[in-house]
Amino acid sequence: MTDKKRNAPARPKSRRSSGVTHVNEPHHDNFTVVGNHLAQHPELSLVAIGLALHIQSLPEGTPIGIKTLAAKFPEGEIRIAAALRELEQHGYLARPRERLQSGQVTTRTISFNKPKLAVAPAAPVPEPEPSPRPKAPAAGRSATELLAGLRAHDSRLILTERDVHRLAPAVTEWLERGVPPTAVVRTLTSGLPQDPIKHPAALLSHRLSARLPPHLPTPPASVTPSRPDPLQTCDGCDRAFRAPRPGRCRDCRPASVAA
């Protein structure tokens, strides 16, 4: 009686994952080491992560101003400025201001491959006092940068570029009325509702309109004090006295009249 051969159980077919498949090759030159704390940061935007990677790959001393980066990449100055502020907030970038021996104030950029605390400037630089009537181009640029940076204070205040340019004139009106930018940001970000903000642009538009402060009062015209009469030498007693023209002093004047 022959034994019947049992069929071996078929091996389950391997299923290819729908996620990413890595094909890694070693780099021996021209590469930059980046930590996963940056590449997988849960709070940084993709623009900020990419900008940090680009900055860390640059040689020492390469200029990385906003206009320089905007000329190199398709993102505009508003998005690049907001990304730089994100990196500063999370400790990947510091931009302390220093005063040179010539008296000129310059900004020094420091990049960290691991997040650090903010670096204090080497030399204290006093903040310039806000101008009560800033020029229109400068005020417009400050307004757009202020609006784009609101999400650094509250991630629910993310605005589109269209919303930023639409709300910029209202912020400019605040700045032209002598309100410092820090006070405008505080007005727009403090006391926000705890619930999700579905329409951040509408909320900000309402605050900018409802809380607009009045114009600064016009300072009173300064009264120029009248200058005293010049000193004269009395023709009678050679004593000095004040008078609009040469002559005799008060004591000698009656005697001359009587004579």
Image (spheres, rainbow, N blue to C red):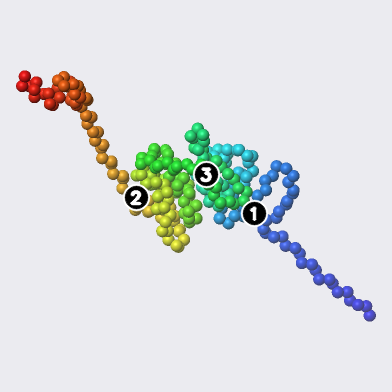
* Residue to which mark 1 is pinned: 36
Image quarter of residue 228: top left
Q: Nearer the viewer, mark 1 or mark 3?
A: 3
Amino acid type of the residue tagged 2 in the rendering: Leu
The first of marks 3 and 2 along the sequence is: 3
The first of marks 1 and 2 along the sequence is: 1
Residue 66 seen anywhere in this rendered image of the structure: no
Residue extending furthest toward the bottom:
1
Image quadrant containing the N terminus: bottom right
Q: Position of residue 252 (x, y in %)?
A: 12, 23
Residue extending furthest toward the front:
237
Q: Which mark is residue 212?
A: 2
Closer to us: 21 or 118:
118
Image quadrant containing the C terminus: top left
Tag 1–tag 2 contact (CB < 8 Å): no
Closer to us: 155 or 97:
97
Residue drawn at the location 41% of the way across and 55% of the way down: 203
Q: Residues within 10 Å of mark 1 (few under 14, many from 20)?
A: few
Element on which disc 1 rests: helix
Element on which disc 2 rests: loop
Amino acid type of the residue tagged 1 in the rendering: Asn
Residue drawn at the location 37% of the way across and 46% of the way down: 179
* Residue to which mark 3 is pinned: 121
Image quarter of residue 189: bottom left
Residue drawn at the location 60% of the way across and 38% of the way down: 62
Q: Position of residue 32 (x, y in %)?
A: 67, 46
Closer to us: 18 or 229:
229
Element on which disc 3 rests: loop
Q: Position of residue 12 (x, y in %)?
A: 77, 67
